[in-house]
Image (spheres, rainbow, N blue to C red):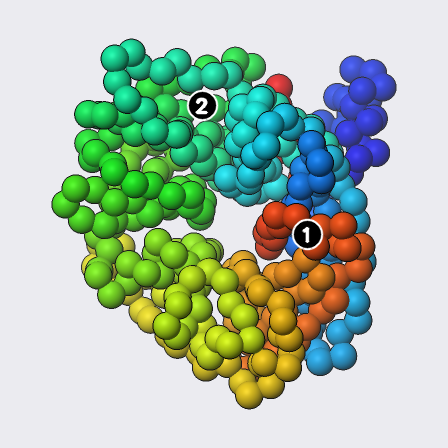
Amino acid sequence: MKSVARFRCVSKLWASIISLPYLTELFTTRASAHPQLLFVYKEKKKLVFLSSPQPQNLDKNSSPVAVKHLSRIPFRGSSCYVSGHVQGLVCLRGKPGRIICNPSTGQALTLPKIKMMRRSFSTKASNMLGYDPINNQFKVLSIRRYYPFDQNQVLTLGTGELKWRTIKCSTTLDVFQQGICINGVLYYPVSTPVRDMIGCFHVRSETFSFIKVERTSRGAVFYGTLINYNGKLGSLISGGGYRSRFIDRASRSINLLVIGNFEKQEWSKHEYVLPPTWENVVGRAELRLVGVVGTNEVVLSHPSQVIYYNIETQGVVKVAIQGMEASSECKFATFINHMEDLKLTQAFK
């Protein structure tokens, strides 16, 4: 993928050949058949992106997997974190500001600053990356809480002009967290003065809707990991007394919440008891619940290993990750189903 990105810089002719619809579609088809695990960690003043094959057939004797170094994205300041991963693009927030990058090619795009409203107190903005599969468009949603009102803005990538546009939302938000994009809709947990809800930003129409959250489901929505569960919105959270998106040797179960029909509020809850061998497999590692691959493999991640837990058979497979030693003492994140795509470079035009 890096070589392809370099070829674009050779000449306009080479760039036009690489951008041919036939070639990009062929590359996309092949890449989608081989999804990757994407790893991100901080190294001094850079974010380091690595990937490894996402296992298709797991067994207890799975061999260690080596990572492939993709790119390093520089940043200034003491903080920079990933606030979204969609269709191979990643949204970063920190200094020098909001950045959209393609880890596979190393391309990075700094978004323009948002003008702040005068005479109002503002909290930090929450930025999320969304994708409209119908029009093949990426959009960045920025929600900033202003007292006594909010400011919601959206920016479309790939139009040749980077410009924030203000959009209306009828609901005032007190607290909002990072979410996930599924089938053209950005989902994110929000709290209002009246109730807890899941915000839904429809990327194509740039409209909002909201789903009420039951009190018994609040922990999973706000403290768990929001996931794409077979095309439906779901959440993973550790069971037991301290419920969170992290899990260790003392954990006894994993809870899965799946939201089916939004209009009928069809919520299904499942608890999966971890096997007796869990404590020995995990050791002293603290794992993060990442998501579900296939139909039944829960992915848990640590800088030195990835653990797959089959919710149907209760089987546990640990796959060692080689080449991640430098990240053991750094902030670390893992994303599933990362896909390299030549068409993604069009978003930077």
Residue 320 shows in the view = yes
- Residue 179 pos. (x, y %): 42, 45
The residue shown at (56%, 34%) is 79
Q: Residue furthest left?
A: 194
- Mark 2, other Cα within 10 Å: few <14 / some 14–19 / many ≥20: many
- Residue 335 pos. (x, y %): 59, 51
- Residue 163 pos. (x, y %): 46, 15
Tag 2 near tag 1, CB within 8 Å: no
Nearer to us of marks 2 and 1 is 1
Amino acid type of the residue tagged 1 in the rendering: Glu
In the rendered image, the vertical position of residue 90 relative to residue 330, given as above or below: above
Amino acid type of the residue tagged 2 in the rendering: Leu
Q: CA distance from mark 2 to mark 1?
A: 35 Å
Q: Residue furthest bottom?
A: 276
Q: Quadrant of residue 27?
A: top right
Task: Give the secondary structure at mark 1.
Answer: loop
Rendered image: mark on residue 245: none
Q: Quadrant of residue 149?
A: top left
Q: Quadrant of residue 146?
A: top left
Disc 2 designates what residue? 155
The residue shown at (35%, 37%) is 202
Residue 34 shows in the view = no
Left or right side of 89 for 7: right
The residue shown at (75%, 21%) is 16
Of marks 2 and 1, which one's residue comes earlier in the chain? 2
Disc 1 designates what residue? 329
Left or right side of 124 for 81: right
Of residues 265 and 222, the one nearer the viewer is 222
The residue shown at (38%, 43%) is 177
